[in-house]
Amino acid sequence: MKRTFIAIALLSVLAATFSSMAFADAMSYLSARTQFSGNAGYLWVTPNSGAPNWQGPDLGGALTVSLHPQFAIYGSYDHGFPVAGSNGQFNIVRVAGSYKAWPALGVESSNSVFVNAGRGWFGRSNIRAVRSTDAGIVVSHLFKPEYPSMAVALAWSHAFADEGAGDFDFVKLCLNVH
Amino acid sequence: MAFDLLKFLTMVLGGFGIAGLEAEAQKQLEKIKADYPDVSDQVSALESWLTDKLAGTTDVAKMTATIRGIAMDIVNGTAGIDPQAWQGSV
């Protein structure tokens, strides 16, 4: 039920946005709002389904479409390298909606708080081991005015795993560049 | 019957369990403070800061109204030509 709600909400926003546009207008709209970003940091994953906890350095990237100054949709990929080699590497793919909860619209601040929710796919050697509906909070600090494209971010997410897998959390501290 | 966006959003947010998510975050913060007592003061400071900034976001009715406003801006094309650079995608 949860994943159906999330999928319907995200698709409805995209469909409503593009339904009244010509193809060229839609492409122009997308190019003005689309952004690639990369990040590097450290990832912690709590135990789930009998598997031990996981932690290690992490590299990630995201494609973000900012539909509104307070709302964006993004797809991201993360690859984690384990501290202990026996734990294997870790992969995360997410598609989520992100709501800028603070500061309020029109208020300038180097710090921001985002609340996000979406779908996630996880695994140590692939992304098919666990699927989930997940939600989380991101605290971000932009290094502006010196480096306005660079931010340090702390993200916490809770994964409501699909049937057969236990829920778990993942935390990431990283430097993000866009 | 006409589609009621407000009712739909309330159902989505309520169904997703915003309050449940807040409880889960609280549980994790307590666990971190217990596991890493050296940084418990810093974690408490972060918790206090977040609680202050996110006041109202776990209120389904208030959040529903905000998201409805955002959705209407997007649908009506009044969300701005070039929305601000985004930093939430981590």
Image (cartoon, rainbow, N blue to C red):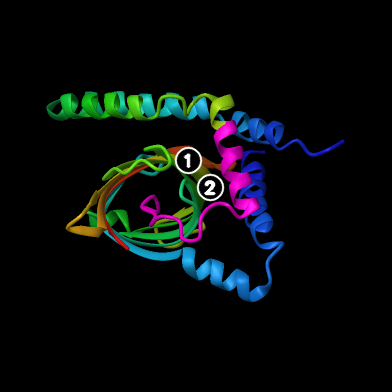
Rendered view: A126 above or below B20: below
Q: CA distance from mark 1 to mark 2?
A: 6 Å
Q: Quadrant of the C terminus of chain A?
A: bottom left
Cβ–Cβ under 8 Å for marks 1 and 2: yes
The residue that label 1 is drawn on is: A135
Rendered view: A28 above or below A116: below
Chain of the residue where label 2 is placed in the rendered structure: A
Q: Nearer the viewer, residue B43 or A102?
A: A102
Provide residue A124's location: percent of width, then percent of height: 39, 57
Q: Residues within 10 Å of mark 1 (few under 14, many from 20)?
A: many
Q: Nearer the viewer, residue A2 or A90?
A: A2
Q: Which residues are magenta?
A: B64-90
Q: Which residue is rendered at x = 67% and y = 31% of the image?
A: B11
Provide residue B67's location: percent of width, then percent of height: 57, 38
Provide residue A161's location: percent of width, then percent of height: 52, 42
Q: Which residue is rendered at x = 25% and y = 30% of the image?
A: B46
**In this picture, residue A50 sits left or right of residue B73:** left
Residue A1 in view in this figure: yes
The residue that label 2 is drawn on is: A118
